[in-house]
Amino acid sequence: MLDLPNLRRETRYGLPSADQVLFNRHYVLGYSYYFRQAKWALEIVDPEKSDIARADNYRPDYRVPESFRADLADYRNSGYDRGHLVASANQSDTEIQNSETFLLSNMSPQQPGFNQHIWKKLETAIRQLDARDEVFETYVICGPVFYFDTDVSVIGAQDDNGVTLPIPHAYFKSVLTENNKGALHMWSFIIPNKSSRKPLKDFLVPTREVEKLSGLFLWESLVGTKIKREKNRVRKMW
């Protein structure tokens, strides 16, 4: 597959910066050498339903230089989940499509109570949004958030070949839908990396806030007064 951003559907509305951009068959990921994990992961939610089994074949991504690459040992006995950025259930049309979501470049250290509950709940809600008849396509970008006025813990470096993985304080997810009339709608979330039973609507924030905290420009190909207004508003939960 050609690794040209302008030929990828996922990047239609923008491609944030990163130390290394990794082009997979069905999603694009921006990797941070400093944080030893992705800064962002960008996908179009796959609307197809299939009987493809979840691959569960977690493995290093050897496209990332060894000095900055996470390995399975870095997560072992850490107490943290290998949390998906691009959800396995969003990419399940073919075996290889699902398998690519288990590359460790698509993982980030997540508290089990976060990964298995509120984060999973948001992933499910986005698939339900995408399944609506009026929704033509659903674009999703997500990644870690670090608060630099707060101590950062790490996992990993269990031997000379390991790396340390900073544990994000929170995660962002920004959702952009295009409906069957061509209208664009945007929702953004910031959720702390801990267990929560709060409703998803409590984590809605303006997209501008996500940009400030993540250091990324989101959906930068979209310009104009309406988009500025959309980025500064908090749209009600769908």
Image (spheres, helix red, strand yellow):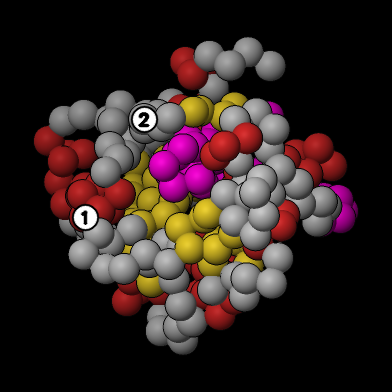
Q: Position of residue 112 (x, y in %)?
A: 59, 76
Residue at image coords 76%, 52%: 58
Q: Quadrant of residue 220?
A: top left
* Element assignment for label 1: helix
Q: Residue 132: within the magenta?
A: no
Tag 1: amino acid? Glu
Q: Nearer the viewer, mark 2 or mark 1?
A: 2
Q: The magenta stretch spans which residues?
A: 25-54
Q: Quadrant of residue 95?
A: top right
Tag 2: amino acid? Ser
Q: Position of residue 163 (x, y in %)?
A: 57, 49
136 vs 185, left or right, is: right
Residue at image coords 55%, 33%: 28
Circle 1 sits on which residue?
Answer: 209
Work out whether 231 lies above or below 170: above
Marks 2/1: CA–CA distance: 18 Å
13 vs 54, left or right, is: left
Residue at image coords 27%, 68%: 150
State whether residue 27 appears in this view: no
Work out whether 6 lies above or below 205: above
Q: Residue 42: within the magenta?
A: yes
Circle 2 sits on which residue?
Answer: 17
**Mark 2 surroundings: few (<14), some (14-19) or many (≥20) residues within 10 A:** some
Q: Nearer the viewer, residue 65 or 105?
A: 65
Residue at image coords 48%, 63%: 154
Work out whether 211 lies above or below 1: below
* Element assignment for label 2: loop
Identity of the residue furthest to the front in this view: 160
Q: Quadrant of the N terminus?
A: top right
Q: Earlier in the sequence, mark 2 or mark 1?
A: 2
